[in-house]
Amino acid sequence: MKRAFPILSVVTALLLAYALYQALVVAPTERTMGDVQRIFYYHVPSFAVSFVFFALSLLGSIAFLGYRHGNPGRAQLADALALAGAEVGVVFCTIVLVTGPLWARPVWGIWWTWDLRLTLTLVLWLIYVAYLILRKFSTSGQTPVIAAVLAIFGALDVPLVYFSIWFFRTQHPQPVMGGGGSIDPRMLHAFFINLVAFSCFGALVCWSRYRFEIARRDVEDRQALEGMMEAGASR
Amino acid sequence: MNYLYAAYAATWIIHIAYLGLLARRYARLRQEIEELKKK
């Protein structure tokens, strides 16, 4: 993976550039919303990718809770994966919360409304931000356990966010794909290329964050060992 | 059109800021590894 990483980074960068070209140049202008609809090519893939990383965080958290007594080594890896997934998920969810109002202002005439999907997305973001703050500042030995439980609670919000527009009357646009609407194939292509490009980008960033977390924990363990050896030698 | 550019710019500013944060953390970790090697 170490050797493949630079190649994958270049491929992802090219894919992102191609996706940008598709979104801004190739995809036709939507009739009612105009050019502002092109925000969807970044907003919706970011939304989907954030869900994938929150799901990864959920899996890591469950694995951590499962392994923490029987296999501490694997539990550490699972915990690192949960943290990496949550952090990258928060980055993509932040983009969703920023690009959404930038689309809503010209189309709805308002930046924000306390609509069910918007509110649940904000709650989701706040839960995972709380998770990251807990991971950063808590020094308790129980922190990974509390964080894992919090990540599991946070992930419960994901299906609520997704299905909120299906089961409740909301102001948020209904899905075009799978919702009975039709879409120009060029728009569909631009959407899927952006989805693939941002998924690849997110996966690379998450992998880097995961490797960093493992290396950081290794350094911390070595520092603790050094400290203990120094304390033993001074006695 | 301004909203469109603002949204695309905001997306890349957030991603680049996060990548910058990761790079800074990596640099700090590398420094800590060097210090451990010296001991």
Image: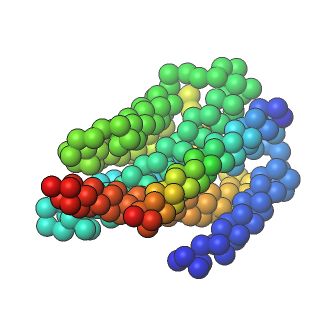
Residue sitting at 47 percent across and 31 percent down?
Answer: A122
Residue sitting at 20 percent across and 55 percent down?
Answer: A234
Q: Is residue A53 left or right of residue B12?
A: left
- By what rule are the colours in the image chosen? rainbow
Q: Does residue A156 appear in this view?
A: no
Residue sitting at 46 percent across and 28 percent down?
Answer: A119
Residue A3: quarter of image: bottom right
Residue A134: quarter of image: top left
- The answer to whether A34 is drawn above or below residue A14 in the figure is above
* Spot occupied by residue A184 in the image (x, y as percentages of width and height): 75, 55
Q: How many marks?
A: 0
Q: Is residue B24 left or right of residue A163?
A: right
Which residue is farthest front? A234
* Spot occupied by residue B25 in the image (x, y as percentages of width and height): 52, 51
Front-most of A92 and B19?
B19
- The answer to whether A54 is drawn above or below residue B9 in the figure is below
Front-most of A199 and A215?
A215
* Spot occupied by residue A96 in the image (x, y as percentages of width and height): 58, 40
- The answer to whether A10 is drawn above or below residue A185 in the figure is below
Front-most of B1 and B32?
B32
* Spot occupied by residue A193 in the image (x, y as percentages of width and height): 69, 62
Q: Does residue A13 appear in this view?
A: yes
Q: Is residue A109 left or right of residue A58?
A: right
Which residue is farthest bottom? A3
Residue A2: quarter of image: bottom right
Q: Is residue A182 left or right of residue A214?
A: right
Q: Can you say which quadrant of the picture contains the C terminus of chain A?
A: bottom left
Residue sitting at 70 percent across and 20 percent down?
Answer: A109
